[in-house]
Amino acid sequence: MDKRFFLALFLSLIAIAVSQLLFPGKPQVPNQGAVGKDSASALASTASSTQSSPTQATAVQAPASATVQRQATGTTGAQLSAAAETTTIVTPKAIYKFSNVGGTPVSIVNRDYKNRSASGGFVDLGAAGFPLLGYKLITPTDTVDLAHAPFTLVRTKDANGDEVLTYNTTAKNLGVSISYRISQDTAASYAVRVDGRVTGAQSPAYLISSLPTTLRPTEADTVGDHRTLAYSFKPTRDHARSVLFGSLDPGEKTLESGPLNWVAIKNKYFVFGIIAPPKATPFSEVTLEGGPRTSKTATTASANVVQEIRDGVFSFEIYAGPQESQRLMRMGQDFDHVNPYGWRFLQGVVHPIASKVIQALLWMHNRLNLSYGWVLVILGVLVRLALWPLNQSTMRSSLKMQELQPKLAAAQKKYKDPTQQREAIMKVYHDAGVSPFAGLTGCLPALLPMPILFALFFVFQNTIEFRGVPFMWLHDISIKDPLYILPLLMGASMYVLSWIGMRNAPPNPQAKMMGYMFPVMMTVVLLNMASGLNLYYTAQNIAALPQQWLLARERAKARPAG
């Protein structure tokens, strides 16, 4: 019975994983009719606009010149209708470029990360000619689009030495001031504080911030990188959620009601997000819309975020950088959940485990000063060592259960009445000092490592710490083994583990079938997954071999002679 339970549970996990990968679900569309006409939704709907899809551009190289430089560039077309003056701020980790047209950032280069796609250079989250943010003001009487408004710049430094760029303009009798505070502190890298003030606006007034319609590919597998494009958001009173571009049909709109702590666009390893600080006004809602498609892969979409302007002011923070878990945690507001681990129905279980696994890997990497490849090997060995006492206890319970089988069969044969039969069976268990649930606990040693393996499946999809990490013949543990050595070694080690486990055990056709079936299934499932995931599971299997051999010997000694 326990073997069947184990088999059914394992097959269910495999079915869930494969089905979610092949058939991702559609995002749930809230009831838009529930939003009142005087709310932010009614005002924002008047400002609905279509954003053009940016074309793929070459990554911007990091200039080695002065910290702040200005260049006048004449730009034509719908994106920038007037001459733009670009201001560049260089920090130890990033290069920021702001335009006076729209008063918005247009490029943010991550200096520590190379773009591994054909464009090369450093990772740049901006697309040429398209701002990273677009602003609109909504009042009861008017809609003011600031995308093409010319701003004047005032550049200062605060008491901490942080650069402060303040853009000012007047549009339709509204005074608008937007300040960007850029810190030189590496601990605050990739983060920019935004503070705005609007004068002359009637209440209620709202700011509509348009996020980028796409992010440039940063990986060699550009198609795979595009498939990870998604908008993520965090409701104040709910788990973070993510909507893949591919799950939004062209022109399909989805309204996600707030309050929201943050909204972000992300690809596999990088993210651009706006975050409402704890004391600031949260975002009221976000409207997502699928973009046009030129192929089966969705590469564009749009997101318009609504924030109420209270007492004439608004504020939020920008994070534009790598999905490093520790940096995301420092941003607060659960921004480290920008990549929700586990599908929505499993997120509450998988995400806490995945977060702890990442913290453990980072801690071992920093404390032991070892590469992540060896850290994964050590983690696999530690998991098996932690399970050693449980395996011993389970094996001894299994031996006792085998000894009780003749007595249990005799009790069932002697008593036909169900009540008497049950009492007789319980007496057999009581006299032997064995729990009647000992048979079910035999599955635990095999099931307990599965949550970690399942969590690592999600961790390796977007943990930038593993990006480009070599190990032995592997040039990158975050992608599949090009030689397929590790998946095959993992399957072989799993088969040997099962084979040793069946030695000196009573004949069991089901166990024999699983001994052949599981290694093949796991090899097929993990064949094209991250080589680091295969490395961890292979190390765990090999570490379990000595104990499995000792348990087989103990079973042989306990087996009745004859």
Image (spheres, rainbow, N blue to C red):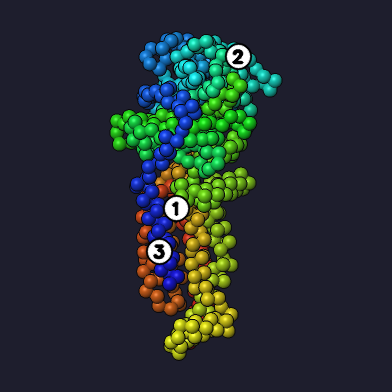
Mark in the foreground, 1 or 2: 2
Q: Quadrant of the N terminus?
A: bottom left
Q: Residue at x 33, y 32 (%)?
A: 250
Mark in the foreground, 1 or 3: 3
Of 389 and 130, nearer the camera is: 130
Q: Residue at x 57, y 17 (%)?
A: 198
- The kind of residue tagged 2 is Arg
Q: In the rendered structure, are the residues bearing label 3 and label 2 in contact, judged by CB atoms less than 8 Å apart?
A: no
Does residue 240 sit above or below 428 in this rendering?
above
Mark 1 to mark 2 CA distance (whole Å):
52 Å
Image spot of residue 293 (x, y percent): 31, 31
Q: Can residue 129 be seen in this snapshot?
A: yes
User: Of marks 1 and 2, which one's residue comes earlier in the chain?
Assistant: 2
User: Of marks 3 and 2, which one's residue comes earlier in the chain?
Assistant: 3
Q: Which residue is mark 3?
A: 8
Toward the bottom, the furthest residue is 414
Of 495 and 1, nearer the camera is: 1
Does residue 553 sit above or below 105 in this rendering?
below
Image spot of residue 148 (x, y percent): 45, 14
Near mark 1 (Cα within 10 A), the count class, few <14, some 14-19 or many ≥20, is many
Q: Which residue is mark 1?
A: 534
